[in-house]
Structures are given as C-alpha cells and as structure tokens.
C-alpha cells in the first residue's frame, strides 16, 4: 500500500474516532454542565474514541493479527500508553478552549484541534512502539 493511500485511510479512521469521541461527549453533556459532567464526558469520550481507533488501526492500518485476550491486552496496553501523550494534547486544547470561551462550540473546536495534532503524532508512536512500521507488501 502506498503512503498516500495509507494516509487517507488513517485520516478517515481518525475522523471516525473523533466523531465517536465527541458524540459520546455530547451525550454525556446532555445530562448537565457541571465540572463533574465535564470530566465524565471527556473521559468516556476518550475511551470511545480510543477503542474505535485501536480496532481500526490494528486491523486496517498495521494489519496486526494478534488474537486472544492475552495478545489483545498486550497490544492494547502499548497502544493506550502511546495515547497518553496524545491524549494530554487533546485534553489540553479542549480544556483551554473551554476555559477561555466557555461555549460548547469552542470546546469542541479545541478538542478537534487537539485530536488532529494528537493523531498526527500517534501514528509515528504506534508504528515505532506498538505495531512496527507498515511495509509496502502489506495488503488490505
């Protein structure tokens, strides 16, 4: 698979994960707007996006065939660890935008910017520390 096709597929999967993340956040925010609701929304949205992105990346970006609970646990743990840095970028942008403008639109804009930056970094981390680089011979 050429780099352009891989980048387009990765971008599409990032968009799906972003929609999952922000969609879950919107559901949680529909229950209120306290600080506790904010924390719950950000954490549950992040978990949803992480799971969607992991399953898509593992299968369709890195073509990893690991199976079973033990195998998935090992790979997912590494995947989540590389996500710590990228999640802090995402949460940082989302929170700063919320604190400055105090509107849902600006919070989501901050989240979107943070997620784009984070996913750009995450591919490099995942190909180095989680799955290994994608090689030209890998097929979908």
Image: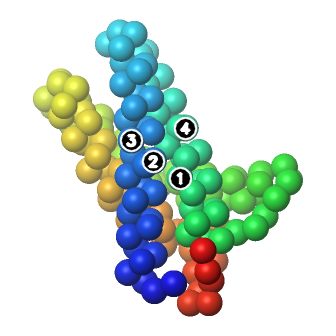
Q: Nearer the viewer, residue 28 or 2?
A: 2
Judging by the rendered image, the residue that carries numbered circle 2 is: 17
Q: How far apart are the two marked residues, 3 and 1, measured between alpha carbons?
A: 11 Å
Nearest to N terminus: mark 2 or mark 4: 2
Asked if the residue at tag 1 contacts the one at tag 4, i.e. Cβ–Cβ closer than 8 Å, the answer is: no
The picture places residue 131, in percent across and down from the top left corner, at: 65, 71
Mark 3 crowdedness (10 Å alpha carbons): few <14, some 14-19, many ≥20? some
Q: Quadrant of residue 130?
A: bottom right
Q: Is residue 50 above or below residue 129?
A: above
Residue 137 visible (yes or no): yes
Rate crowding at label 4 as few (under 14), some (14 to 19) or many (20 or more) other CA atoms within 10 Å.
some
Residue neighbourhood size for the residue with mark 1, other residues' Cα within 10 Å, grouped as few (<14), some (14–19), many (≥20): many
- Tag 1 residue: 53
Marks 2 and 3 sit apart, C-alpha to C-alpha, by 5 Å
Tag 3 residue? 19
Calculate the distance from the C-alpha at mark 3 to the C-alpha at mark 4. 12 Å
* Residue displayed at 59% across by 87% down: 135
Q: CA distance from mark 2 to mark 4?
A: 10 Å
């Amino acid at each position: 698979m050429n780099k352009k096709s891989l980048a387009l597929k990765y971008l599409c999967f990032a968009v799906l994960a972003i929609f999952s993340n922000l969609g879950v956040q919107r559901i949680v925010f529909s229950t209120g707007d306290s600080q506790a609701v904010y924390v719950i929304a950000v954490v549950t949205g992040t978990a949803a996006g992480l799971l969607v992105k992991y399953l898509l990346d593992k299968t369709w970006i890195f073509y990893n065939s690991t199976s079973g609970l033990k195998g998935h646990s090992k790979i997912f743990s590494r995947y989540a660890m590389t996500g710590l840095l990228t999640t802090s970028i995402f949460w940082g942008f989302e929170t700063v935008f919320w604190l400055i403008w105090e509107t849902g639109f600006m919070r989501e804009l901050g989240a979107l910017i943070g997620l784009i930056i984070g996913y750009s970094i995450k591919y490099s981390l995942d190909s180095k520390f989680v799955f290994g680089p994608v090689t030209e011979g890998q097929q979908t």
